[in-house]
Amino acid sequence: MSESYTASDIEVLSGLEPVRRRPGMYTHTSRPNHLAHEVIDNSVDEAIAGHCKRIDVKLFKDGSLQVADDGRGMPVDIHPKEKVSGVELILTRLHAGGKFSEKAYQFSGGLHGVGVSVVNALSKQLECWIKRDGQEFNISFRDGKVSSKLAVVGQVGQRNTGTTVRFWPDPRFFDSDKFSVPQLKHTLKAKAVLCPGLRITFDNETTGERDEWFY
């Protein structure tokens, strides 16, 4: 260890690097269920705001989880100050989101902009599809960084809107990279109970089981 301690010894972590260095400060590291909660909470917030009536969750055989909603769709326009798309900002920067002020959300169950970027940081791969303004967009990430830039991949009806996020938890950051299905189902049922009129489905590709909650 050096005897001197100067400004050059100070390390500044940017982007999602703080999360990847110290994941335990941001999430539970036993299993990736907390990551699922963050993505689900984003969709539930759309429901609370009156813009989402359905959330479909699917657990794939490869261990990835997908959350799809029929909300407004994450913003795809370029942020005036940061000069990147809204969705890229949300998924690659801590404390970036629409929940600090009441302009986009009056009520929120999420972690004030930390949540979904943490999911990206601790996933080996993340795919996001957005439907809004008559178009479908896709953006891809690997190890928390953009691997495929935001691009239009199709056309949809003007009323066909929503966000789909599929992510593959990185086993390096968890004791087990497998989701606890009972915990996941408990969470989904609780969200449905708290949001009357919101339909939530869960498909487990590994067992073929399907659950649905609607109150």
Image (cartoon, grey):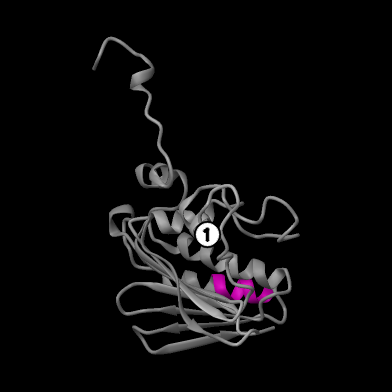
Residue type, label 1? Ser
Quarter of the view holding residue 97: bottom right
Q: Residue 209: x, y in percent? A: 43, 88
Residue 192 highlighted magenta (yes or no): yes
Residue 209 highlighted magenta (yes or no): no
Q: Residue 33: x, y in percent? A: 45, 63
Quarter of the view holding residue 105: bottom right
Q: Residue furthest left?
A: 1
Quadrant location of the C terminus in the rendered image: bottom right
Q: Which residues are magenta?
A: 187-193
Q: Is residue 135 left or right of residue 182?
A: right
Up-down: is 177 above or below 199?
Answer: above
Q: Is residue 54 left or right of residue 104?
A: left
Taking the spot 54% from the left edge, 79% from the top edge, the residue there is 135
Looking at the picture, tell me which residue is in the foreground, 21 or 187. 21
Q: Residue 28: x, y in percent? A: 44, 53
Taking the spot 38% from the left edge, 89% from the top edge, the residue there is 208
Taking the spot 58% from the left edge, 47% from the top edge, the residue there is 81
Instruction: Count numbered badges in the picture.
Output: 1
Q: Residue 92: x, y in percent? A: 46, 53
Up-down: is 141 above or below 61?
Answer: above
Q: Main secondary structure of the magenta part?
A: helix
User: Please, what secondary structure does the residue beneath circle 1 have?
Assistant: loop
> Dot 1: within a 10 Å radius of its alpha carbon, few (fewer than 14), some, or many (20 or more) residues?
some
Residue where numbered disc 1 is placed: 85
Quadrant location of the N terminus in the rendered image: top left
